[in-house]
Image (spheres, grey):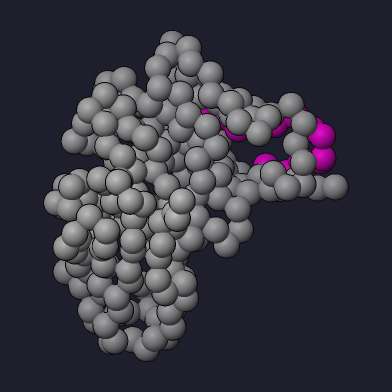
Amino acid sequence: DAGVIQSPRHEVTEMGQEVTLRCKPISGHNSLFWYRQTMMRGLELLIYFNNNVPIDDSGMPEDRFSAKMPNASFSTLKIQPSEPRDSAVYFCASSQRGEISNQPQHFGDGTRLSIL
Amino acid sequence: GDSVTQMEGPVTLSEEAFLTINCTYTATGYPSLFWYVQYPGEGLQLLLKATKADDKGSNKGFEATYRKETTSFHLEKGSVQVSDSAVYFCALSYGGATNKLIFGTGTLLAVQP
């Protein structure tokens, strides 16, 4: 079975440009999570969706960040305009949500973003 | 609120040494507990899990027991290998609508030959 697929794997762009990161969750999973990982701040949850609906976006740093999930098989994380401090590895993860306990989250390989 | 605390790293061991990485949690309910591992340049992978008190999760020689009385979920392995070098994350999660993972800060393990 295919795992969580993220694209691109690497992105280098100049400050001020729009950046779009993409994620395809595992088929049948109904929860999707976006994380950011840096040396300074570690692993941070940015936003997550259940059944394509955003549940908690309190981790989104500021209005420059937005995320969408138009259907069960696709999500995007957009940064506009980008800044050098947004440089990080961004991970997408998906899981099957249960009422009592959850199946584990499965992570993609991440997008390494560098803003010059 | 809920939180997870891990021992500070890095942890440096020689091959075949015994490993313990401490993890304690604070929870308002009865969460499931997880250990994830991140190898260099990769995403996190589930290593093991336990869903209720006294459960023991195990995988690839690693073990952890869900201790409600001490609110702990320490990771252990009897004999580490160089290939175990990675960052290890302890985490908790509930079922239902609030199903996000709450992670610890991660512990870097370096195993030397």
Residue at 26% across, 67% down: A76
Which image quadrant is residue B25 in?
Answer: top left
Residue A97 lies in magenta, yes or no? no
- Above/below status of A9 relative to A29: below
- Above/below status of B26 relative to A9: above
Residue at 44% across, 54% down: A3
Residue A112 in the image, given as x and y percentages of width and height: 46, 71
**How many discs mark residues in the rendered view?**
0
- Residue A48 showing in the rendered view: yes
Residue B56 lies left or right of residue B100; in this view the side is right
Residue A107 lies left or right of residue A67; in this view the side is right
- Above/below status of A59 relative to B45: below
Q: Residue furthest right?
A: B113
- Above/below status of B54 relative to B3: above
Residue B12 in the image, given as x and y percentages of width and height: 73, 44
Residue B40 lies left or right of residue B66; in this view the side is right
Residue at 40% across, 81% down: A115
Q: Main secondary structure of the magenta part?
A: strand
Q: Residue furthest front?
A: A1
Quadrant where the image shows the N terminus of chain B: top left
Residue at 85% across, 47% down: B113
Residue B105 in the image, given as x and y percentages of width and height: 47, 45
- Residue A59 showing in the rendered view: no
* Front in this rendered view, residue B101 or A75: A75
Residue B104 in the image, given as x and y percentages of width and height: 44, 40
Residue A41 lies left or right of residue B13; in this view the side is left
Magenta stretch in the rendered image: B10-25
* Front in this rendered view, residue B83 or A37: B83
Residue B23 lies in magenta, yes or no? yes
